Amino acid sequence: MTKLKKDKNIIIIISLVILNVFSLISLYSSIYYDFELQNSIFYKQILWFIISWILLIVFSFINYRLYYNLTIPLYIFTVLLLSLVDMFGKTAMGSQRWLSIGGFNLQPSELSKITTIFILARFFSQGKQINFKKILSVLVLILINAFLIYKQPDLGSSLLIIFLFFFVGFFSGIKKIYFIILIIFGLTLLPFGFKNLKEYQKKRLLVFLNPNIDPLGAGYTIIQSKIAIGSGKIFGKGFLGGTQNQFNFLPERHTDFIFTVIAEEWGFLGSIFLIFIYYIILKKILDTSEQLKDLYAKILCIGITANIFLDIFINIGMTMGILPVVGIPLLFISYGGSHLASSFILMGIFLNIYKQNN
Amino acid sequence: MPLKKLYLTGFFIIIAFLIYYQILKGDYFYTRSQNNYIKIIPTSALRGKFFDRNSNLCAYDEVAYNIAVIPHQIKWKKDILFKEIAKSLNYNEEIIYKNYKKNFQNYFTPVNILIDINKMEALKLKELLGENIIINTLPKRFYVYPYEFAHILGYVKETPSLYLDLKYGYSPNERIGISGIEESYNDYLSGTDGGDLIEVNAKGDIVGFIGRLKPKNGKDIYLTIDKDMQILAYKLFNNRKGTLIFMDSNTGEILALVSSPSFNPNNFVTGKNVEEFLNNKDKPLINRAIQATYPLGSTFKPIVATAALEKKKINPNTTFFCKGKIKIADREFKCLGIHGKENIYEGIMHSCNIYFYNLGMILGMESIVEYAKKFLLDSLSGIDLPYEKKGVLPIISEQKKWFLGDIINLSIGQGTIEVNPLKLTIALNIFANGGFIVKPYLVKKEKQNIKKENIGISKDTLETIKKALILVVEDKEGTANLLKTLDLKIAGKTGTAQTKTKAHGWFFGFFPYDKPKYTICVLLENIGSSHEAVKLTYDFLFELKNKKLINND
C-alpha cells in the first residue's frame, strides 16, 4: 500500500522532470539563432529550475493548514506589493523594461494567484454556512487583486484570477446558482469593460476575432503561429528544424509562444505527448482530492488544478488562435522565473496535502 | 467527477484544433512556412542621368544615407535607442517616431527612421550604436541646375509600389517621374530594381544566399538643350512671368526652353519646403511654354496675311489706307498710329490694325479659322513633355452667326483664340524653314527621326511674308527695330495681346534671314506691351552672340 502511494507520488515528480527537459529543449531551440538571448536565457532558466525545485521541496514540508490562518495577512501583503509595483513601476518605466528581459524581477501577480487560491479555499470550505453576501465579499477581494494586476498592465493574469474564482466556486459544493447570477451580471458589464481597455489590448481582442484585420501588425503573431503549428504536421520538423521559429518569424517564442515551437518541431505527436503529461498531473491531483476528508485541502487541490488547467488552456488556445493573445506563459515550459516558481510552489503545497492526508 | 470531465473536454478541444491544423491542413501550412523565411532585399536601380547637348551633367542619382532599424530586434529598447539617436544627432525625437510609424511594414523589414542624413553623421551613429541600426543607402535624385531645368526635367517622387506579387511582406517604394522628361521618359530612365533572395536569421543577418537579380540601371538621356543658353535665358526673366523658346528652325530641336517663375525640384524629391511653390499665386509649377494658352495678338497677323494671299483676296501690292481709325457699321476702331497707304509689307511692319481689319472683312471668319487650322494651331506640338495644353479657336458652324466685331477681333489675334507659346512658335516657324511644321523635341536620340510636315503654303506667299517680317526689325519704322543693332539679320513679329488686365508682350523671330537656323519666341505676361519681350530677346541674343554660343554664318 505505501509502495503504491509512493509510486503515485513519483509519477508527479517524473512528469515535472519530463516537462523540465521539454522546456530546456524548446528553449534551446527557440533562441538558437538569437545570439543576444542565447547566453543569458538558457542558463538563467536552469538556475530558475534549481530555485523552483528547492521551493517545491520546502513547501512540501510546510503544513498546508498554516495557510488557513495566514490567508488574510498574506492577502494584505499581496495587495501592498501590487500597489507598490504600481507606483514604483510608473516612476522607473524605462529601467524596469530592461530588467524584465533578465526575468529575475519578481512579479507579484504570480504571488497573487497563490493567495487567491488560499482565499477561495478558506472561504468556500465553510460549506453550507456560506451565503451570497459572503461570496460577494470574496469576489470584492479578488477584484481588488485583479484590478491592480490589470493596471500593471497584465490583462491575462487579472482575467485568470477572476476565472479561478468562478471555477473553484462552481466545483466546491456551494449552490451554483450564486455563481450563475454573478456570471450573468458580469456579462452585462462586459461592453463597459472593453471600453476601458488600452488601445493595444482592444486591438489584440479584435484581431483575435479576425487576424486578417492587421496581418503584419497585431494579427501577425497569430498568423505566424498558426503557420508554424500547422507546418509541424504529424511528426514535426525535428529539433532545431522549425523554420518559422529559426528564421524568427515568431515573436515571443521563448515565452508566450513556446508551444508553437514545440508543435512545429515535434509535430502532432509531440504536442499530444505534452498534453498527456499535463493530464497525468491534473488527474493525479484530482484523484487525490477525491479521497480527502479535509474540505479546505480539497478546495486547495481544486484551485491548484484550475490554475494549471486555465494556464495551459489559455496559452495553447491563444497560440492556435482559439483565444485572444493575453500574455499567459505556458505552464512549466515557458521562459520566466516567477511563473515557474509560483507553479512549483503550488505543486509543493499539493505534495504536502498528499503527505498530510495519507 | 465533473471537474475531470471538464478538463478532458478542454484538452480535447485543443487536440481537435491540433488535428485540424497539423493533420488536415498540415500540407497547406507546411507550404506556407516554406515561403516564409526567404526574403527579398531589394537593390535599387540607378535612374538614368541627364546631360545637356554638350555632355554637361544636369541631373543624377546621388547616395542618400538613411538610418534604419529592424523593429523586432529593437522592440525592447526602442524608446531608449531613439532617445540616444535624437540626442547624438541633435534631432527632434518626434521626427524619428513619425518616420518609424510611417515606414513600418513588419517586424523584420528594416524601417527607415532617419532619411537622407549627412554621411559622417550616419557613420558616427553606426559606430556608436553598432548592430542596433542599419545604414541604408538609397539613390536620391539631384538636379544640378534646379530652377533653370525644372520645367524641362520635372522631378522624381517616391510612391508606394504596386508590386503586389512580392509576397514576403516587403513593399519597397518606387521612384517615379512627375512632370517633365522624368515623367515622359520614366520607363527609359528608371531601369529595373534588382534584389537578393536570402535566408535570414534572428538578427536579420543573412545566413543563406539563394540568388541575386542584378539591378539594371536606367539609360542616360542627352538633351537638345544648351545648358549655358538655358541658364542665361532663365536669368533674364528675373522671376517675371513668361516663357522663352529657342530652337533650331529646321529640325525643331529645342536649345533653350524657360518658364518663369520656376521651382526647385530638389525640394520635391525630399518633400521639404514645397509649400512655397504649391501655394504661390504665380503658379511656378506650370510650364508656361506648353501648359498655358494665351491670346496671340499681332503675332497672329502673318497667318491672316497668308490666308489673304493664298485665297488670292489680295496680292502683295494691294494697299489699304490707315488714317488712324476706321468706322465699320457705325462703330469706330482705332489704330495705334496713322500709317497712311500700306501694302502688305508695310501693314505687317507697322503691325497696322486697320490693314488687318480690312483683310479680315475680305476673308471672313471661316477663312481665317481655316488657316489657323492649316497652321495646326488647334493641335498639340507633340513635344516630348507631358500635359501640353491644346489651343482654342473659334468654332465654325452653319448655325452660328458671326458679328462684325468677331471678325475684327480675330483678324488681329484677339477674341476666341488662345494658343500655347510653343505651338505659336512652331506655326510661325514655317516662314523660317520654307513651309514646314516641325515637331519640337528635347531628347536627342541616336537616330534622330526629324518629323516635318509641309502644310502646302505656296513659295511666293512664304517669301512675301518672310520679306515683311525682316522689315519688322530692319526698317526703322518696324516694331522690333531695336534688334537691328545685333546684326543677326533677324526677321520677326511683335505682339501685344490685350487681356482683362495688362497686355501680354510677344516677340517671335528667326535668323539669319537668308538661311534661317534659329527661331526664338518670347512671351511676358501682363507686361503692358511687346517692348519688354523685344528687349529680353535683344539681351538674350546679345549674350549668345557675345559668348559665341551661336554661329551665324
Image: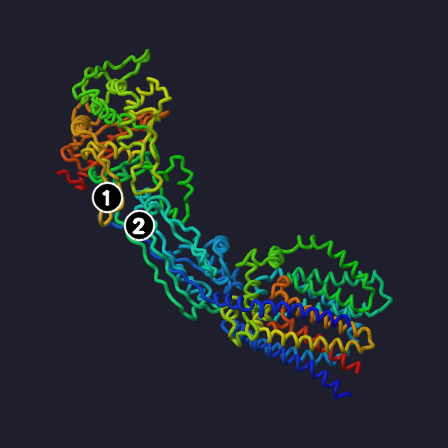
B376, B535: nearer the viewer = B376
**Outermost residue toward the right in this view:** A129
Question: Where does the C terminus of chain B fall, quadrant-wise?
Answer: top left
Residue B41 location, x and y as percent? 41, 62
Query: Which residue has dot 2 on it?
Result: B59
Residue A283 location, x and y as percent? 72, 76
Residue A326 is tagged as none
Which badge, 2 or 1, is on the more N-terminal residue? Answer: 2
Report helix, strand or loop for mark 2. strand
- Nearest to the eye among marks 2 and 1: give it: 2
User: Which residue corresponds to the image point at 71% horizontal and 80% vertical from the top-left?
Assistant: A58
Report helix, strand or loop for mark 1. helix
**Outermost residue toward the left in this view:** B553
Image color mode: rainbow
Label pair 2/1, CB-CB below 8 angstroms:
no
Residue type at mark 2?
Answer: Ala
Q: Can residue A150 be seen here?
A: yes
B316 left or right of B122 in image: left
Query: Which residue has dot 1 on it?
Result: B228
The quadrant holding residue B340 is top left
Residue A344 location, x and y as percent? 68, 76
